[in-house]
Image: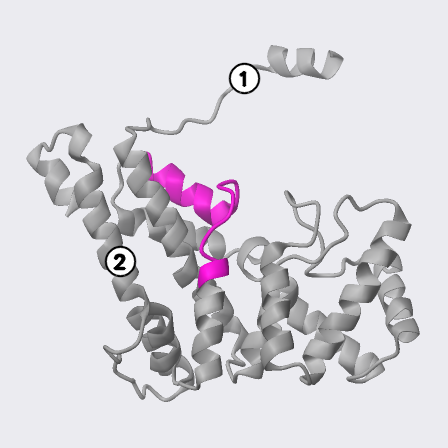
């Protein structure tokens, strides 16, 4: 819609209208696209049709083949809390940047997803799961607080980080972590891995504070999400970034509509000379 309207010479004050239509179409189609990828990749191409009685997020879970009440409720939570946060993250900023050139929502969102595919942005919850599995392999599924504390210290002393802890912006426990924890306490309080995640919540911040090097020792959203997905049978960790991408469309495409409505200009990074850089260093 937007590309065709632009080619027809639509007034720029009207840009947001076809941009909105494209965005809504894309949001509506993404659960079917993602579930098709999931079924073709992991379930022998056995496609499940959508259920018109279900909502957007529940349909994603259903079409993936996870139709329990708990799985669908988790998917609603997951899609909501991963939809967006501040615009400085790679996928949100890339979508905004490409959209500022008046690329349509499809191109802009695709660009954002290439950023999300990078391991520093989109693979965080998989890395948390790998680390937790390492804890289990080393200490068992129910380690003592003392043993876990020693394991965390060993991780740091070996020059590694504890994945899922710290955030570039937040300086307190990520509220997205908190709502996932509340979900787990309600629906899967006896899950072994959840109990381990809870114990890490008691141990890791204290250790990170003691190092004196960490501004934010608290857990972020990725410290919990993979554990919940695993509990409800969504065990294909390589697919988690796809679920993240589906949810991110809600935030970045909404921002794109506002960008067109407000008439924001094309984004251009500032360039400076060597003289300017040298002066900054002297100061």
Mark 2, mark 1: which one is toward the viewer? 2
In the picture, residue 170 is in which quadrant? top right
Residues 204 and 153: in front is: 204
What numbered label is drawn on residue 152? Answer: none
Scheme by which the image is coloured: one colour
Residue 114, percent across and down? 43, 54
Residue 108, percent across and down? 33, 46
User: Image height check: is 106 above or below 101?
Assistant: below
Q: Secondary structure at mark 2?
A: helix
Residue drawn at 65 percent across, 57 percent down: 220
Whether pointer 2 and pointer 1 mark residues with C-beta atoms closer than 8 Å, the reply is no
Query: Is 107 on the left-hand or right-hand side of 239?
Result: left
Residue drawn at 50 percent across, 80 percent down: 234
Residue 13, percent across and down? 18, 29
In the picture, residue 248 is in which quadrant? bottom left
Extent of the magenta region: 80-101
Residue 79, percent across and down? 44, 64
User: Mark 2 — residue?
Assistant: 26
| Residue 195 makes an appearance in the image | yes
User: Mark 1 — residue?
Assistant: 272
In the picture, residue 62 is in which quadrant? bottom left
Residue drawn at 89 percent across, 58 percent down: 157
């Amino acid at each position: 819609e937007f590309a065709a309207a632009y080619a027809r010479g639509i007034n720029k004050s009207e840009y947001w209208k076809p941009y909105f239509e494209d965005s809504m179409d894309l949001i509506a189609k993404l659960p079917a696209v993602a579930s098709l990828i999931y079924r073709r990749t992991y379930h022998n191409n056995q496609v499940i049709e959508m259920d018109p009685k279900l909502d957007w997020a529940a349909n994603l879970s259903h079409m993936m083949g996870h139709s329990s009440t708990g799985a669908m409720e988790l998917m609603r939570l997951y899609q909501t809390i991963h939809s967006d946060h501040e615009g400085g993250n790679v996928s949100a900023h890339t979508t905004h940047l490409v959209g500022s050139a008046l690329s349509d929502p499809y191109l802009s969102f695709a660009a954002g997803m290439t950023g999300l595919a990078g391991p520093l942005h989109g693979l965080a919850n998989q890395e948390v799961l790998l680390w937790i599995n390492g804890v289990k392999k080393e200490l068992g599924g129910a380690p003592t607080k003392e043993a876990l504390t020693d394991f965390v210290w060993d991780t740091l002393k070996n020059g590694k980080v504890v994945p899922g802890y710290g955030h570039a912006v937040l300086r307190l426990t990520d509220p997205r972590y908190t709502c996932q924890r509340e979900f787990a306490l309600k629906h899967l309080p006896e899950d072994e891995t959840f109990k381990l995640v809870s114990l890490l919540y008691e141990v890791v911040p204290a250790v990170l504070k003691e190092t004196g090097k960490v501004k934010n020792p608290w857990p972020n959203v990725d410290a919990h999400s993979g554990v919940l997905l695993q509990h409800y049978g969504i065990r294909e960790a390589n697919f988690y970034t796809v679920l993240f991408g589906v949810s991110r469309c809600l935030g970045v495409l909404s921002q794109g509509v506002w960008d067109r409505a407000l008439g924001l200009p094309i984004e251009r990074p500032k360039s400076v000379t060597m003289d300017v850089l040298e002066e900054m260093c002297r100061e």
